[in-house]
Image (cartoon, rainbow, N blue to C red):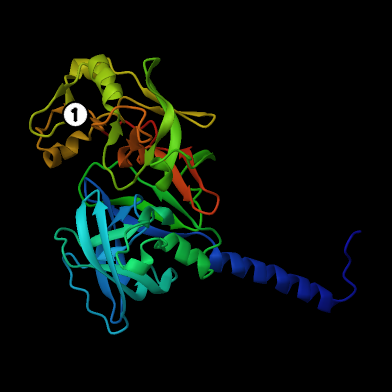
């Protein structure tokens, strides 16, 4: 039945309902936070506590725990000690600390009250970590006897639970960096920023194969020059890990095929310009899609060679040895060099990971 409006009051009510819907979307729609590339990782500025103190935190998708206090001391009038001890063996090292509940603000619109934040007592390095990993990744981190089976939700979940965002999802855009402190990265909480990718986002379910199932794990196959390096098996997508890691047997096949020689100073495979010209693309088979990792994507940006103890004109490959044989349920890590070429979405409620091509998928900036 077609709806009709009998008078101006009905029309105004209809318009008000439409405006309310628009306001609702603008309040709960995806929100973007800028990131800074520090060559080996991306960081985000986060305000914690009252009065607010700004921390530069490494974005980490392998853990749901946000922790602070390594460089900048945690001092807050609003923080409440939850009397929970936490210990994590992290990709950046191990740390121990205490859980406090306090206000965490990514932006004025993306603020979380009573967010559980681990305050480190043993780590020294950067300020800390913003955890956007699945909640299950924190299982076993809490050390009190009555809470060892408990988990700590990531900021993504808290923003969804308090109705700040409509989805417990985060979109990640990393543009290939050519200098340190590049600020062309971003996180989008609540969904994806569709201005940052080309074509549609294709999703694949989180793997059920342990231990990759505890993280943003997926199943994929990798080939090089039509030779299979890794069978379709489980591994992890991790924005906090710099390089692309593959199982030892796959790495050896790749090393021989590319003619790479391990550089003693940094452990990376090094090739000549002649070998570079002969490189083939890596192919990633994820779900029903094939993602092409070009020869330029396979090399470390030469403008950042000083970061990896290299000379200006050295050519280093970003594929590294995972130091374990395939078949262990953790056969690869698609690190941030992969995410610099493909827009990525971690969707917690739907237990899936999405990928899309970007204007930089086939860039030659390296």
Residue 280 location (% of width, % of height): 33, 18
Task: Say whether residue 43 is left or right of residue 1.
Answer: left
Which residue appears at 20% of the width and 55% of the height? 94
Instruction: Evaluate whether residue 330 shows in this view.
Output: yes
* Quadrant location, the N terminus: bottom right
How many numbered marks are there?
Answer: 1
Q: Left or right of 234: which side holds 44?
A: left
Of residues 26 and 66, the one nearer the viewer is 66
The C terminus sits in image quarter: top left
* Whether residue 345 is situated above or below residue 220 in the rendered picture: below
Q: Position of residue 233 (x, y in %)?
A: 43, 30
Q: Position of residue 251 (x, y in %)?
A: 27, 24
| Residue 99 sits above or below residue 65 on the image | below
Work out whether residue 164 can be spotted.
no
- The residue tagged 1 is 316
Task: Sort mark 1 into few (<14), some (14-19) or many (20+) by Cα contacts within 10 Å.
Answer: many
Residue placed most toward the observer, 162 or 19: 162
Furthest-bottom residue in this view = 77
- Vertical arrangement, residue 310 with respect to residue 350, above or below: above
What is the secondary structure assignment of the residue under circle 1? strand
Q: Quadrant of residue 254?
A: top left
Q: Is residue 128 above or below residue 92?
A: below
- Quadrant of the image occupied by residue 143: bottom left
- The single residue placed furthest to the front in the displayed view is 145
Looking at the picture, tell me which residue is in the foreground, 42 or 135. 135
Q: Quarter of the image holding residue 295? A: top left
| Residue at position x 22%, y 35% in the image | 301
Residue located 35% across and 37% down the image: 334
């Amino acid at each position: 039945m077609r709806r009709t409006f009998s008078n101006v009051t009905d029309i105004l009510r209809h318009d008000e309902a439409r405006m309310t819907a628009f306001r609702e979307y603008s309040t709960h729609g995806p929100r973007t936070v800028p990131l800074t590339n520090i060559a080996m990782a991306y960081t985000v500025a986060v305000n914690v506590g009252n009065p607010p103190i700004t921390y530069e935190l490494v974005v980490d998708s392998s853990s749901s725990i946000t922790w602070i206090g390594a460089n900048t001391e945690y001092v807050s009038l609003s923080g409440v000690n939850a009397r929970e001890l936490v210990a994590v063996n992290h990709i950046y090292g191990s740390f121990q600390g205490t859980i406090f509940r306090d206000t965490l603000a990514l932006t004025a619109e993306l603020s979380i009250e009573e967010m559980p934040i681990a305050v480190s007592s043993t780590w020294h390095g950067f300020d800390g970590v913003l955890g956007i990993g699945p909640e299950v990744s924190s299982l076993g981190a809490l050390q009190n006897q009555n809470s060892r089976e408990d988990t700590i939700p990531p900021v993504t979940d808290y923003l969804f639970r308090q109705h700040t965002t409509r989805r417990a999802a985060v979109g990640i855009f990393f543009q290939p960096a050519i200098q340190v402190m590049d600020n062309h990265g971003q996180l989008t909480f609540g969904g994806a920023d569709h201005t940052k990718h080309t074509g549609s986002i294709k999703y694949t379910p989180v793997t059920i194969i342990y231990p990759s199932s505890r993280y943003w794990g997926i199943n994929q196959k990798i080939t090089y020059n039509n030779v299979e390096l890794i069978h379709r098996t489980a591994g992890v997508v991790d924005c906090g890990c710099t390089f692309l890691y593959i199982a030892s047997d796959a790495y050896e096949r790749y090393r021989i095929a590319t003619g790479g020689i391990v550089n003693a100073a940094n452990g990376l495979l090094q090739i000549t310009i002649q070998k570079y010209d002969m490189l083939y693309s890596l192919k990633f088979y994820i779900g029903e899609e094939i993602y092409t990792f070009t020869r330029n994507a396979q090399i470390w940006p030469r403008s950042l060679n000083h970061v990896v103890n290299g000379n200006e004109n050295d050519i280093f490959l970003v594929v590294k040895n995972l130091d374990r044989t395939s078949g262990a349920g953790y056969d690869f890590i698609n690190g941030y060099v992969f995410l610099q070429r493909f827009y990525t979405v971690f969707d917690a409620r739907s237990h899936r990971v999405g990928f899309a091509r970007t204007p930089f998928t086939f860039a030659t900036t390296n």
